[in-house]
Image: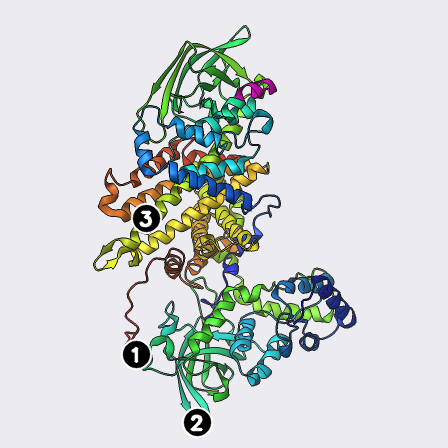
Amino acid sequence: MDLVAENISRAMSVSDESQFEPARRIQFAFTDEQEQFRAAIRRFLQEKSPPTEVRRLMDTATGYDPEIWRQLSEQLALPGIHIPEQYGGAGFGMVELCIVTEEMGRALLCAPYFSTAVLATNAILNAGTEAQKSSLLPDLASGVRLAALAVTEPNGQWDPQAIELVATPVAEDFLLEGAKSYVVDGHVADLLVVAGRAPGTAGGEGLALFTVRADASGVDRRLLESMDATRKIARIEFHGAQAQLLGDVNDGAKPLVRTLDQAAIALANEMVGGAQAVFDAAVNYAKLRVQFGRTIGSFQAIKHKCADMLLEMELAKSAAYYAAQAAAADDPEWPALACLAKAAASEMYLHIAAECIQIHGGIGFTWDHDTHLWFKRAKSSQVFLGQPYYHRELLLQRWGV
Amino acid sequence: MSKVSETDVRAEVRAWLAANWDPEMSLVAWRNKLVDSGWGMPHWPEAWYGRGLPLGLVRAVEEEFARIGAVGVAKSGVRLLAAATLLEHGTDRQKERFLRRILTGEDTWCQLFSEPGSGSDLAGATTRADLHGDYWLINGQKVWTTSAHHADHGLLLARTDWDAPKHEGLSYFVIDIKQPGVDVQPLKQMNGHASFNQVFFTDAHVPAENLVGRIGEGWKVAMTTLAHERRGADGLSAPAKRGARTGRIYVEERRELETANQPYTWYPQRAGRVDLILDRAKETGANTDPHVRQEIAKLMILAKSAEWTARRARAAQQQGRPQGPEGSLGKLAASHVARAAAHVHTLMTGADALLTGPGSPRDGIIAEILVSVPAISIAGGTDEIQRNIIAERVLGLPKEPRFDTGPFRQVRKN
């Protein structure tokens, strides 16, 4: 009987205890305050962003409701949740930011949050001079202005080394020449943070971030038709547009890389939230739908699928949470964990969304059923910021393998 | 029991150890002292070799023992599962007879639950117990019995009523293994080890007084055993590493542990040896192959995520929050990790994966991983049973219709 009689801790012993260094400062549980914060956001989004609203907004050109944006800025202070108080923010950090994105992912909120708060704001925090942070961040924290980060180009790569856009110094400023694509919320942003390179440079050399007013001359913006209509993307061409250097040219690609790593963690958490929503829908449906005189959830084929989905989701959730906590604690390993969390979450989310359609059967393939909204967000999130294979490779490089 | 503080407990155990601990004593003599004092199992009731302390203070006591290298009571194998079951369901006479020698290590125990015909469906046991006056006659076969070849007693689940429904016709006994009616045969596994036994009963005797609990309540008693097993026998720690300490008692303890741990030498390999992966990647040069790198990364993501999930469950528990789904997934996660690790290990090893034994990579460890991993998704509840448990208890999905609810005699069997 001892084959049945072994305790689980022994089964887990190699992967659980002996192999990894204990992480002392990194938290494995949210505080009560963080849970309350989460509950408040969830209540807000349940009320303001039901699927009917998601459907309404995804069919608009701007893709968001300015009134809801005003409320989440004024009532919940979300755009500046992670911005230090001296720049008009709430002064919290990565963990709180990721709680926000997780809840927004769950509700599939249509709003320029990821672009403004996660990407552009972090780019300014990471790269900007004191003066730039003081002048740019308060309006982003208050939600008065929107911003986007333009990194990817028509070549579709998130690796900063693939950037081709050239920034030529002219007096105090720079003139930008080149094209950006897949810029999330690029069509509605007031301020663009643009990644470019010095003339004649290649690879990791000569990279820097620039700020450009979206209405500056020489900036051509075009909304692209996106497969995931809940996340709008734009192509932006720069024809000699006037830009300011963000921060110090000697920092090179570092602030950009840091920004993308933070964004990967925030996106992993967003995906975890979205996956939970479709997963819950699938399990609920399995309890209701009757075929062959039984609820389909009583068939092992469905039960086992659901159990596997839960496992996959909880594992990715642990990675997303851990990466956020590690980044908040500034653990030296956190950039590697960003890759880990992004790869785990994006494989998981698409799989869960596809299985959710499968469990719903025919109804799950209809336009009127909501699952496809999350399915499309899952796929767009998998590609956005780099595919899983890219992050797995980067993970090993960062681990020194 | 009045409320006791950790400081008081530490002071008390420290004083007692200072007065009594002697590494030159024999193991059994020392453990008899422990049993008499109650410090061996401080959370057990005072009437039965304990001190009635709350479970939360056991760790403090253990730390005091570890601080001076004092040896504890015997804890290896299934002996503590036997003890916990007897404490809860045994008669005073049974407790008197068995508990002390469990703790001193003089008696070794084994667990006789699984049968060839009932693996996942444990309650379908068909080993029979028939009452003849003041003793029961046992006939049938058990399997997967660790340590049966040197055990003194067994925890036996046997059928006493064939007309009752499956779960209600079982009874629970303590059986003397060293008797003519009990034949223990080693069971060789696909990895070449023989960590388990088959146990055949042919008119083996169990005195009537060895019935644990009432007739027909065997399933309930067995659940107690399994619950303690899942709790890791009350979360008691494994014996501390003794380092360079010397004394007669350590020699005896080491010998005891070697015997107790002998069946488990391949268990690290069964779990996949994720700890070797990154070293092996460099060692084999597999770290330069983009395809293999992807597989390595997938495995490490899985293994790390499983580790963090276990930590997350523990952290929630420590904060006194209700257990989330993450607490029920460890077993299934471990299966996935092990299988993925075996895949990556053999992938990296290339053609050398065709070899086994001392001449093969890492002295046969890599080969042993491959042929040991299949056990992990079976032992302690198959992956399929785990999925049922998760689906039904965590997700609230309905149970499947059953075909085994009538009299057991009429239930289809192997």
Using the image, name the chain to which the residue with label 3 belongs. Answer: A
Write down the residue under mark 1.
B407
Camera-nearest residue between A47 and B300: A47
Which numbered disc, 3 or 2, marks the residue closer to the eye? Answer: 3
Q: Name the residue type under label 3.
A: Ala
**Which stretch did the figure color magenta?**
A129-137
* Number of callouts: 3
Mark pair 1, 3: CA separation: 37 Å
Q: Position of residue A304 (x, y in %)?
A: 34, 55
Marking on residue A282: 3
The chain containing the residue under callout 1 comes to B
Q: Residue A294: x, y in percent?
A: 24, 59
Give the mark nearest the N terminus, 1 or 2. Answer: 2
Q: Nearer the viewer, residue A157 or B228?
A: B228
Please name the amino acid that badge 2 sits on.
Gly
For residue A351, side relative to residue A394 (left or right) = left
Q: Mark 3–mark 2 contact, CB under 8 Å?
A: no
- Does residue B345 belong to the magenta stretch? no
Crowding at label 1, few (<14), some or many (≥20) Cα neighbours within 10 Å? some
Whether residues under marks 1 and 3 lie with C-beta atoms below 8 angstroms apart, the answer is no
Circle 1 sits in a helix, a strand or a loop, which is it? loop
Q: Is residue B347 shown above or below A256?
A: below
In the image, residue B365 sits, relative to residue B14, either above or below, namely: above
Q: Relative to residue B61, is residue A146 drawn left or right?
A: left
Residue A387 placement (x, y as % from top left): 40, 34
Residue B363: % across, % down: 53, 54
Residue shown at 61% from the left, 68% from the top: B257
Residue named by callout 2: B133
Name the kind of residue labelled 1 in the image.
Answer: Pro
